[in-house]
Image (tube, helix red, strand yellow):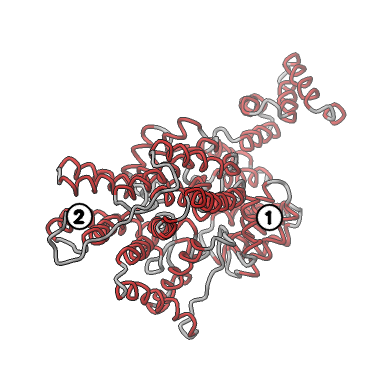
């Protein structure tokens, strides 16, 4: 049947597909190969800011769920659907990371299936192959293997479901389908704001299919979506700038610099899709310099590409490139995004944007191979997918734990000051403080105005008994970042270690003033007062520390020992017993409890605690 239109109809080819056409077979294949490709990441631990996404203790109640939805600032970003999902997941498997990883892999595989369904609905050649490309391409690893990026996988599922619902509405103009599509779009927006690009993408798809746009049919129904997307984008931009900190000298780029950056970012992402080599967590931070002629080639080439495709009347490739660039628009550099502090590019930024390129690649590969024998097409496709799957398997392993992640980052980007600092934190936490020091010094050499590294270096030097060396670094951290409560507390510790207790107390008090919920600062303030012979003044600080973190073993044990030293043995018992409820294997606490009981004349109970302490640590028999 011919169309009566002034525009030539869009021709779609459907060459023989080397892959099974059955949706069930394709779904099983996608889930199977995706799970196999991501096996190295499934047993992985929490990374970087995962602790800020997995629901905090104060948000784990029903009241906390209400705060997720109705209190701005309760979570890192106002993504209530995402954090509601994390809230539910924590109820299901707590802090066990396997559940989060399995769900993220499952969401990625689901998105791949929906992507294939969408392409089939649009009669794009090679739909199954494109879905498998997306499922196995290593560029997706950062989004799938990193728990925090569930915002990508979950939002993409809603995004694709909304697109499918819109196509159904477009075919029959049913209000019910419009309501469904709009609801799914809102869910996507409330999971991650980058999905705000969907209405523009749908208009491009309409233009690609029909060669024109009808304002009343195509544009008007999507106007509310544009409004929702704009509001969501403004809210997210405000959070990025005010709450997360995407402002300051590191983000001061001129309009010309932002244009140059956008062109380079566009080609970087396209290049990584075509040749996914040297993928890394943090890429080198570029210097954007308008005086370098070569940097102008990127935006010029990016602008010429769609012009060339339009001139050649290649509507399909043009639509794919425009969809790709449009989905990337929020992260091209025109808006401040906090990760730009470390690098202007990140693999997870192009998770959604990559879809039209996979579709274009699949159509471009499948159509020319239609004349080849089925076995050769199947073999070639399988080899390519196996290669991508192997690269994904390898790259997923780098997201297994923080130490592997940061060491692999530094192997590809030795100038990454953030990786040096974060690796040092990991090393210090595993009692390898000596190994941490060189990384912190390197981080400071790369970024001299880095308060966190100065603080961490000072803290580690104090732990190593080098408090005099630590003091200048901690003072420098406070100089660089006034109001840095942790550095104030650590400076107090260093001063106390060198005998300057009066000065230390001042810094502990400052830390508490800056952060009234800082339990460790309250604890150290109490210790400082006790060392100064002012135990009655210390008691309220110990009590405040306990009230802030009632299940902290360190706080309870320290307060118990302080009460013993003050001769208040009866009061110390509750704290020692609470510690042993949390960790029954603490031999020193059993011994302290025995000593307190003995002082109270409860010798039989004391003997039982003493025997348990010696059983856990026989060396205590000689010490006591």
Residue 372 in view here: yes
The mark nearer the N terminus, 2 or 1, is 2
Residue 159 in view here: no
Using a 10 Å C-alpha cutoff, classify the residue at mark 1 as few (fewer than 14 neighbours), some (14 to 19) or many (20 or more).
many
User: With 465 as the anchor, is 238 left or right in this view?
Assistant: left
Total tally of numbered discs in the picture: 2
User: With 186 as the anchor, is 416 left or right in this view?
Assistant: right
Kindly report which numbered mark, 2 or 1, lies closer to the viewer in this rendering: 2
Query: Camera-side residue: 450 or 161?
Result: 161
Residue linked to disc 1? 494
Percent position of residue 331, x then y: 40, 63
Give residue 540's mark: none
Q: Quadrant of residue 301?
A: bottom left
Element carrying mark 1: helix
Percent position of residue 492, x then y: 63, 54
Residue linked to disc 2? 222
């Amino acid at each position: 049947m011919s169309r009566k239109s002034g525009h030539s109809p869009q021709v779609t080819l459907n060459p023989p597909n080397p892959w099974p056409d059955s949706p069930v077979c394709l779904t099983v294949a996608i889930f199977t190969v995706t799970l196999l490709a991501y096996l190295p990441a499934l047993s992985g631990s929490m990374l970087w800011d995962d602790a800020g996404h997995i629901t905090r203790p104060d948000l784990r109640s029903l009241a906390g769920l209400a705060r997720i939805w109705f209190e701005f600032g309760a979570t890192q970003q106002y993504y209530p659907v995402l954090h509601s999902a994390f809230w539910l997941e924590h109820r299901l498997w707590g802090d066990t990371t396997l559940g989060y990883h399995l769900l993220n892999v499952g969401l990625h595989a689901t998105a791949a299936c929906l992507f294939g369904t969408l392409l089939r609905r649009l009669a794009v050649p090679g739909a199954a192959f494109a879905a498998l490309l997306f499922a196995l391409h290593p560029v997706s690893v950062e989004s799938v293997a990193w728990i925090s990026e569930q915002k990508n996988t979950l939002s993409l599922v809603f995004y694709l479901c909304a697109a499918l619902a819109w196509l159904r509405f477009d075919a029959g103009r049913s209000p019910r389908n419009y309501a469904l599509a709009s609801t799914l779009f809102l869910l996507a927006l409330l999971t991650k704001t980058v999905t705000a690009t969907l209405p523009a993408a749908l208009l491009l798809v309409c233009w690609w299919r029909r060669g024109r746009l009808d304002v009343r049919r195509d544009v008007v129904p999507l106007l509310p979506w544009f409004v929702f997307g704009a509001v969501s984008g403004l809210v997210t931009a405000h959070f990025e700038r005010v709450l997360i900190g995407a402002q300051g000298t590191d983000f001061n780029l001129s309009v010309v610099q932002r244009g140059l950056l956008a062109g380079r970012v566009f080609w970087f992402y396209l290049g990584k899709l075509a040749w996914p080599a040297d993928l890394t967590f943090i890429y080198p931070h570029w210097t954007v310099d308008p005086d370098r002629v070569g940097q102008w080639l990127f935006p010029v080439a990016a602008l010429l590409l769609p012009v060339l495709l339009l001139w050649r009347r290649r509507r399909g490739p043009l639509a794919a490139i425009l969809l790709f660039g449009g989905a990337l628009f929020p992260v091209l550099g025109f808006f401040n995004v906090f990760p730009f502090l470390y690098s202007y590019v990140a693999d997870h930024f192009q998770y959604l944007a990559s879809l039209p390129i996979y579709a274009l690649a699949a159509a471009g590969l499948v159509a020319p191979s239609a004349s080849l024998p089925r076995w050769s097409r199947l073999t070639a496709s399988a080899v390519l997918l196996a290669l991508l799957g192997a690269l994904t398997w390898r790259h997923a392993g780098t997201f297994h734990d923080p130490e592997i992640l940061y060491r692999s980052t530094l192997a590809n980007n030795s100038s990454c000051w953030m990786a040096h600092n974060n690796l040092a934190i990991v090393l210090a936490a595993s009692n390898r403080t000596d190994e941490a020091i060189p990384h912190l010094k390197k981080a400071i050499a790369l970024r001299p105005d880095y308060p966190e590294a100065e603080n961490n270096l000072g803290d580690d030097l104090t732990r190593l008994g080098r408090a005099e060396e630590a003091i200048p670094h901690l003072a420098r951290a406070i100089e660089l970042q006034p109001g840095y409560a942790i550095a104030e507390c650590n400076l107090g510790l260093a001063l106390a270690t060198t005998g300057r207790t009066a000065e230390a107390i001042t810094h502990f008090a400052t830390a508490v003033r800056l952060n009234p919920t800082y339990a460790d600062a309250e604890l150290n303030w109490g210790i400082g007062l006790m060392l100064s012979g002012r135990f009655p003044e210390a008691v309220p600080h110990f009590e405040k520390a306990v009230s802030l973190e009632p299940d902290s073993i360190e706080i309870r044990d320290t307060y118990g020992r302080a009460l013993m030293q003050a001769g208040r043995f009866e009061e110390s018992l509750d704290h020692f017993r609470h510690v042993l409820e949390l960790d029954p294997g603490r031999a020193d606490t059993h011994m302290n409890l025995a000593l307190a009981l003995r002082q109270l004349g409860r010798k039989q109970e004391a003997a039982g605690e003493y025997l348990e302490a010696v059983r856990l640590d026989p060396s205590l028999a000689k010490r006591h």
